[in-house]
Image (cartoon, grey):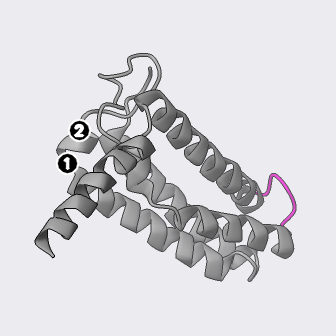
């Protein structure tokens, strides 16, 4: 039985390594992920600021899309060797993310909670949407302040 387990594990290692992504591909995926979050947040923020008319259906759709995005495993987009020190000029993700992954993941948990709040508020009128947008924007800012460089 022990030999079978070892043989199975040995066979699985190359298969697992084949699934590994290059740093460049991981970075592209991460940037795409955050562009989608920005797109969805932009629609909600525009309504909250009065730049576009509030639309409960559109707000709910944006919030649902954010919820879908948050169902992904964020840590997958932060593989080692994908910081701005590793890929200069390509990312603003600072090495402190990997030095403080627990703190970073706490911020991700706060983001997820803010998205859940948004999901409950988005379709319930502008007075419900505005504070939820503020909370969500605050979680984004808190993470950016600690973990994202100001420029490339």
Q: Is residue 123 left or right of residue 3?
A: right
Quadrant in which the N terminus is drawn: bottom left
Q: Is residue 146 left or right of residue 62?
A: left
Is residue 130 within the magenta segment? no
Q: Residue at x 54, y 41 (%)?
A: 29
Find the magenta span and give its range: 50-54
Crowd band around label 2 with a 10 angstrom C-alpha radius: few (<14), some (14–19), many (20+): some
Q: Is residue 28 left or right of residue 97?
A: right
Up/down of 94 relative to 36, above or below: above
Main secondary structure type of the part rendered in magenta: loop
Q: Regarding mark 2 in the picture, which secondary structure is present there?
A: helix
Measure the C-alpha gap from mark 2 to mark 1: 6 Å
Quadrant in which the C terminus is drawn: top left
Judging depth in this view, the residue of 69 and 9 nearest the camera is 9
Circles 2 and 1, Cβ within 8 Å, touching? The answer is: yes
Q: Residue at x 31, y 23 (%)?
A: 86
Residue 96: mark in rendering: 2
Up/down of 25 relative to 72, above or below: above
Up/down of 98 relative to 46, above or below: above
Judging depth in this view, the residue of 21 and 70 nearest the camera is 21
> Exactly how many numbered labels are in the figure?
2
Residue 100: mark in rendering: 1
User: Which x, y percent locates residue 47?
Assistant: 77, 60
Judging depth in this view, the residue of 68 and 18 nearest the camera is 18
């Amino acid at each position: 039985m022990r030999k079978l387990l070892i043989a199975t594990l040995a066979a699985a290692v190359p298969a697992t390594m084949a699934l590994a992504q290059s740093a460049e591909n991981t970075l592209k995926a991460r940037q795409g992920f955050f562009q989608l979050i920005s797109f969805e947040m932009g629609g909600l923020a525009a309504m909250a600021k009065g730049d576009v008319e509030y639309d409960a259906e559109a707000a709910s759709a944006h919030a649902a899309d954010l919820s879908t995005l948050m169902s992904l495993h964020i840590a997958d987009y932060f593989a080692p060797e994908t910081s701005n020190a590793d890929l200069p000029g390509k990312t603003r993700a600072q090495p402190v993310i990997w030095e403080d992954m627990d703190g970073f993941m706490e911020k991700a948990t706060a983001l997820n909670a803010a998205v859940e709040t948004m999901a409950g508020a988005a379709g319930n009128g502008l007075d419900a949407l505005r504070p939820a947008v503020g909370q969500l924007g605050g979680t984004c800012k808190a993470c950016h302040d600690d973990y994202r460089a100001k420029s490339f």
